[in-house]
Image: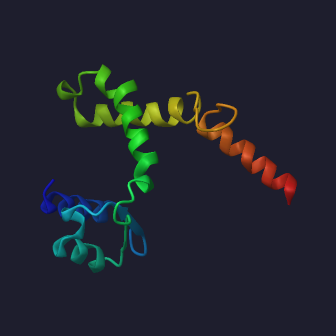
Amino acid sequence: MRKELCVDTFKAAVMRFPLKGAILHSDRGSQYTSEAFRKALSSVQVTQSLSGVNHCFDNARMESFFATLKKELLYRIPTYRMKMNDVKAIIFKYVFTYYNQVRIYTSNPEGLPPAAYRRLTEDYQLLAA
């Protein structure tokens, strides 16, 4: 991945979303540690957070999510033939209606989908307060 791709992608995000004061976390790839990328971040007051040297675990949850997304959805449909907006809609539907609401999630004790597990933990916090 080239630093120009990261810089251009970040600038496109800035055009669409108010990112002032945000924190952007990444690994220590050369594209993210480049002067050009750091300059793009600082120009809109975004703070950079980098993973520690030899700390691969801080990205593990996102790596796992994207692996699941690819295996369960993207590798099963011909995305290369589809319009980008159609692929985005399919991903949005998968994440917000299936992954968060229905899919069994093995990392919590009851196997609840993320939204159900979050509601449960919020209820416990309310009861404890």
Residue in the picture at 27% in, 79% down: 43
In which image quadrant can residue 28 be found?
bottom left
How many numbered tags mark residues here?
A: 0
Q: Nearer the viewer, residue 58 or 80?
A: 58
In which image quadrant can residue 40 be found?
bottom left
For the rendered model, the colour scheme is rainbow
Quadrant showing the C terminus: bottom right
Pick out the residue farthest to the front: 54
The vertical placement of 125 against 108, above or below, is: below
Q: Is 51 on the left-hand or right-hand side of 106?
A: left
Residue in the picture at 79% in, 47% down: 123
In the rendered image, residue 3, in percent from the top left (x then y), is placed at 15, 62
Q: Is 77 on the left-hand or right-hand side of 24?
A: left
Q: Nearer the viewer, residue 56 or 86?
A: 56
Q: Nearer the viewer, residue 20 or 65?
A: 65
In the rendered image, residue 80, in percent from the top left (x then y), is placed at 18, 28
Residue in the picture at 36% in, 26% down: 71
In the rendered image, residue 82, in percent from the top left (x then y), is placed at 22, 27
The vertical placement of 32 against 79, above or below, is: below
Q: Nearer the viewer, residue 18 or 57?
A: 57
In which image quadrant can residue 65 be found?
top left
Residue in the picture at 59% in, 38% down: 107
